[in-house]
Image (tube, grey):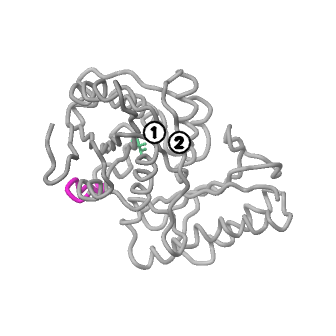
Amino acid sequence: MTANHSTNMRTIRTVSEMQATADELRKDRRIAFVPTMGYLHEGHLALVRKARELADVVVVSIFVNPIQFGPTEDLARYPRDFDRDAALLEKERTDIIFYPNDGEMYEKGFTTYVEVRKLEDHLCGKTRLGHFTGVATVVAKLFNIVKPHCAVFGQKDYQQLMVIERMVKDLNMDVEIVPYPTVREPDGLAMSSRNTYLSDIERKKARLISASLRKAEEMVGSGERNTDTIRRAVDDVLHQEDGIDVEYINICDTGTLEDVPVIAGRAVLAVACRIGKTRLIDNTILTEA
Ligand code: PAF
């Protein structure tokens, strides 16, 4: 274990040390966990603050999980800065950073995967083949290593949250999943480590993503229930400027993620698009007034 200067925050780099530490802590303390891929922003820090409220000990993992990236995705250029992340986590009174390397997480001969069927077939799962299996597998492993009582996940990655909740239920994992609302920039853009890829011009265009969600909320607020009509209006907002390449606009059941023709009760509107080389996602829950 490495002691970080001036506070009690510790960085643990091995699975065996993290498991032994978790066993010791669990004798009389509650552990809250925030899994991340690092390059932390205010959205992650809000999850850490929530974790702080929920337990005695806060563990944050930083691991850019190779198996959730497709062959043409941004694994190599995914932003990384451990020292910056550690300084931010220290300010939030994080107790432990779990910071393994690839070999520690995936030993030679690794061949076991967690597949959350059906939920993977929708939204991002259609184009990011294998992504949610990669996410579910690493989160299952992290739960076995960190042994948390609860874990906080952002609602910005709505499909990820549903996949994790389903996995925990189906595999009887003894972890409470705590969802946390999306944290936004002042102009509405959902915070994401990938926002750092955007040029100034692309960044300005990106505000249209959250604007399109607000448009849908207004329409539902004024009585519109037809999801095709709402999806067309969302698409119109996204095309107010050139350069936003829409991957999907779906309105789905909040649990199964299957498309719904009308809003009855609650539905989730999920959007994915590319601006230049950057793929961004966002969502909102549409609720009948
Ligand atoms: O949301 C993320 O940052 C990642 O998908 C997660 C949950 C840390 C798994 O690698």
| Left/right of residue 275 with respect to residue 95 in the rendered view | right
The location of residue 183, given as percent across then percent down, is 50, 61
Q: Does the closest atom of ligand 1 sit within 8 Å of the Cβ of label 1?
A: no
Q: Which residue is mark 2?
A: 178
Viewer-proximal residue among 136 and 55: 55
Disc 1 on helix, strand or loop? Answer: strand
Looking at the rendered structure, the kind of residue marked 2 is Val
**Relative to residue 45, is residue 103 drawn left or right?**
left
Task: Tell me which amino acid carries mark 1.
Answer: Ala
Ligand 1 quadrant assignment: top left
Magenta range = 77-84
In depth, the one of 151 and 127 nearer the eye is 151
- SS type, badge 2: strand
Q: Which quadrant does the N terminus fall into?
A: top left
- The single residue placed furthest to the right in the displayed view is 223
Q: Main secondary structure of the magenta part?
A: loop
The residue closer to the viewer here, 120 or 127, is 120
Q: Mark 1 — residue?
A: 151
Q: Position of residue 285 (x, y in %)?
A: 68, 54
- Tell me: residue 152, above or below residue 169: below
Question: Could you give the CA–CA distance between mark 1 and mark 2, rounded to whole angstroms?
Answer: 6 Å
Residue 274 among those drawn in magenta: no
Percent position of residue 266, x then y: 76, 49
Query: Is label 1 in contact with label 2 (beta carbons under 8 Å)?
Result: yes
Residue shown at 40%/30% (left/top)?
Answer: 143
Q: Give 45 or 110, whichever is nearer the viewer.
A: 45
